[in-house]
Amino acid sequence: MTELSIQNIANTAALQSPVPEAAPAPAPTAPRLVKMRSFGIGEHSTVTTSVATGAAILLLWWAVALSGKVSHLFLPTPAEVLAVAKSILEDGYANATLWEHVSASLTRILSAAAIAIALGIPIGLFMGLNRWAKGIFDTPIEFYWPLPPLAYLPLMIIWLGIGETSKIALLTLAMFAPIVLSAQAGVRALPLERVNAALSLGASRWQLFSAIVLPSALPEILTGIRIALGVGWGTLVAAELIASTRGIGYMVMSASHFLATDAVFVGIAVIAVCAFAFSSTMRLLESWLVPWKGKH
């Protein structure tokens, strides 16, 4: 058999042999999602920890009060405070009902907050946008802002009398400075890239202010309002301790004159509930107006 015949036979056998099937392609794997590492407290809720802490404080208060080491005159039990709270709620205290005391305090702080917000936000924004405005308003604000409000309460009484006008003016001054400074800080923290981008797109001055400046400064403004309300509550109670016939602070002071510690605890609890309600309202307002805060 010649070499050519052998080659032909080999080729014929190769053609008749079965072709091996190709291996199946591997199934595509799903992309692996990597969660970004959280920073700080992250997204976990702290409600459980807060409730447990509050329960622990109440339990400690109850244990110390029942131990007999401290007289009930100075530290009443929670049950005694609840009994006095029920009595005040039904019969009132210091010649007024509980609602009359609370409504008097709320009227004062809400009136002063409205005035401080209406004046403080525009002035703060103007100070952040204009150097002349900053030069004019910065000196008096920085002068009186570190002073305790009670330091100029006597001056308010001398000028405006002992009525509601002096209290509202005192509260307005106490809340005005934090709002102004926060609005100014919000404008100064505005990135110049946003301003330049808006100007390059042909934005007018009003469009620049309404679409860029105000939304960027809004988180700082809301934070300033929260701080101002906290300062206002402290100032309000102190003002009512000195010159008032209605209000939560007046109720606390009247109870302290008669060593009614349980009634003092009730007044403190009412103040805490009102302050917590204000703080929660501001948190809800922040989540609605600036949902992007803390997410970028």
Image (tube, grey):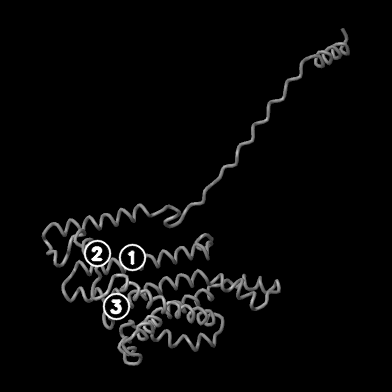
Dot 1 falls on a residue whose secondary structure is helix
Q: Quadrant of residue 176?
A: bottom left
Instruction: State which tag comes first along the sequence, 1 or 3.
Output: 3
Which residue type carries mark 2? Ala
Does residue 87 lie above or below 95 as drawn? above
Badge 1 crowding class, 10 Å Cα cut-off, few under 14, some 14 to 19, many 20 or more, is few
Foreground: disc 1 or disc 3: 3
| Front residue of this view, candidates 266 and 34 | 266
Neighbourhood count class around disc 3 (C-alpha, 10 Å): few under 14, some 14–19, many 20 upward: many
Outermost residue to the bottom = 159
Tally of marks: 3
Among numbered discs 2 and 1, the one appearing first in the sequence: 2
Q: Name the spot of residue 86 as percent of width and height, x first.
A: 24, 63
Q: Position of residue 3 (x, y in %)?
A: 86, 12
Mark 3 vs 2, N-terminal side:
2
**As shown in the figure, which amino acid type bears the numbered disc 3?**
Arg
Q: Answer with left or right where residue 59 lies relative to residue 169.
A: left
**Whole-Å distance between the Cαs marked 1 and 3?**
18 Å
Q: Nearer the viewer, mark 2 or mark 1?
A: 2
What amino acid is found at the position of numbered circle 1 in the picture? Val
**30 displayed left or right of 275:** right
Q: Which residue is mark 3?
A: 246
Residue 166 vertical placement versus 66 (above, below): below
Q: Which mark is residue 273?
A: 1
Which x, y percent locates residue 120?
48, 80
Q: Does the CB distance between marks 2 and 1 fall below 8 Å?
A: no
Q: Which of the image's four quarters has the N terminus?
A: top right
Q: Residue at x 31, y 83 (%)?
A: 150
Which residue is found at the position 42% from the left and 56% from the top? Answer: 41
How much space separates mark 3 and mark 2, taking CA atoms? 17 Å
Q: Disc 2 to disc 1, how far (Cα)?
A: 13 Å
Name the residue beneath numbered marker 2.
85
